[in-house]
Every structure is written in C-alpha cells, then in structure tokens.
Image: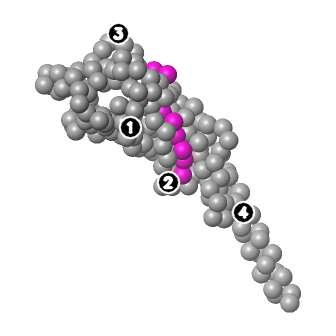
Amino acid sequence: MKKTIIILLIIVLFSRCNIWNRISGAYNFSQCEYTYNAVDNIQLAGINLGNGAGMSLANLTSIATILAGGGNLQTIPFNMTLKMNVKNPNKTPAFLNALDYTIEINDLEFVNGKMDIPIRVEPEQTAVVDLNIGVDLKKLMNRYSQQRVANVLNSFLGISPDETKVTVKLWPKVIIGKTPIKSPAAIPIIFTFGGK
C-alpha cells in the first residue's frame, strides 16, 4: 500500500513538473525577440513570383490584370511563406506545441491561420519560423474593396514605392494533458519595409 501511494505521489509530482515546464517554455517564447527574415514562395493565381525580387515585365502585367479584379476568375489564390527570426534571450528553452496567428498588411486583416507543429528555440539561440500563408484575394476584395487589396499587394510586392507594414499576432498554445490551451494575449510583431 505504501509503495502504491509513493508511486502515485511521484506520478503527480512528475506531471506537475511537466506542466510547469510547458508553461515556462511558452512564457519564454513570449519573451523572444522577433525580426523579419524573408518572404518566399510567393504565388499569385498560379504565377510563381519566388521571393518577389526581379519580377519580369510579363509578370507585372499579369499581376496588374489580376489585381484589377481578376477578370473572370472566381478565386485569386495568393500563397507565400513568411519567415521570422525568433531569438531566445533566456537561459532556458522557449517552446510551444502550436500557435494561432493573424497577419495584417497595412492594417488590412489578411489571413488567420494556425501552425500545429511544435516550435523550440534553444537558450540564447535564433531559429527561423516559417508561416505558410494562403488566402483567396477575391474574398478579400469582396470584404474590403478591389482598390484597397490592390494597393496593399502592390506595396507588399514592391510594385509601388509605398512603405509596407506587416503586423503578425501570435497566440501560443501548450498541451496540458490532451487539451490545447491558447494564450489569452497575443504576441504582437511588427515589420516594415519598402517606401522611398
């Protein structure tokens, strides 16, 4: 009987330590420093734009036509990978099980998404976190306006000389037992680029 009680106490203590470690790792993740790394794998309605640098005149013409409303297109798929540097200044690892995110470009709510794979950044190290983004621009044009979405994309892709502000809001999740617990507060990250 005493052995059973001791074993149960050890299991309870171990599970509490494990929970504390997960919460601590998520807290450390919120204390990390976030910086813009790159945008890659940009695709607009089937046109591969790579990282957006050095677009051809044919691509620019196609982009202008698509952003003018897409003609007869029922959907205008836009996909990309946003890469962020995550620097952990802590003496212990920063980690989480998953996260939800919202991305705004020039104050236009662009996409909401989730990343359901664990992320870990070792102490005093930097890791690159990739957010794969996919959105139907036609839906955004219906929600906001064709002109506003076109202006935001022209700025983002570097076609216009306007500055682009990208706001990323991250909501870390940790798994306690089998239940994902989402942080009530977002980690706000702001990048700006472009502009002349």
What SS does tag 2 mark?
loop
Marks 1 and 3, how far apart at CA: 28 Å
Q: Nearer the viewer, residue 103 or 92?
A: 103
Tell me if residue 101 is in the magenta stretch.
yes
Marks 4 and 2, how far apart at CA: 23 Å
Which label was assigned to residue 17? 4
Dot placed on the residue nearer the N-terminal end, 3 or 2: 2
Amino acid type, mark 2: Asp
Which label was assigned to residue 135? 1
Q: Position of residue 6 (x, y in %)?
A: 82, 81
Dot placed on the residue nearer the N-terminal end, 1 or 3: 1
What SS does tag 4 mark?
helix
Taking the view exactly as shown, the residue that stands out farthest to the right is 2
Q: Which residue is mark 3?
A: 196
Whether pointer 3 and pointer 2 mark residues with C-beta atoms closer than 8 Å, the reply is no
Marks 4 and 3, how far apart at CA: 52 Å
Amino acid type, mark 3: Lys
Amino acid type, mark 4: Cys
Q: From this viewpoint, is residue 22 visible?
A: yes
In the picture, the quarter occupied by the C terminus is top left
Amino acid type, mark 1: Val
Taking the view exactly as shown, the residue that stands out farthest to the bottom is 1
What SS does tag 1 mark?
strand
Mark in front: 4 vs 1: 1
Dot placed on the residue nearer the N-terminal end, 2 or 1: 2
Mark in front: 3 vs 2: 2
* Quarter where residue 90 is shown: top right
Q: Nearer the viewer, residue 120 or 44?
A: 44
* Quarter where residue 178 is shown: bottom right
Q: Which residue is mark 2?
A: 116
Range of the magenta residues?
98-107
Dot placed on the residue nearer the N-terminal end, 4 or 1: 4
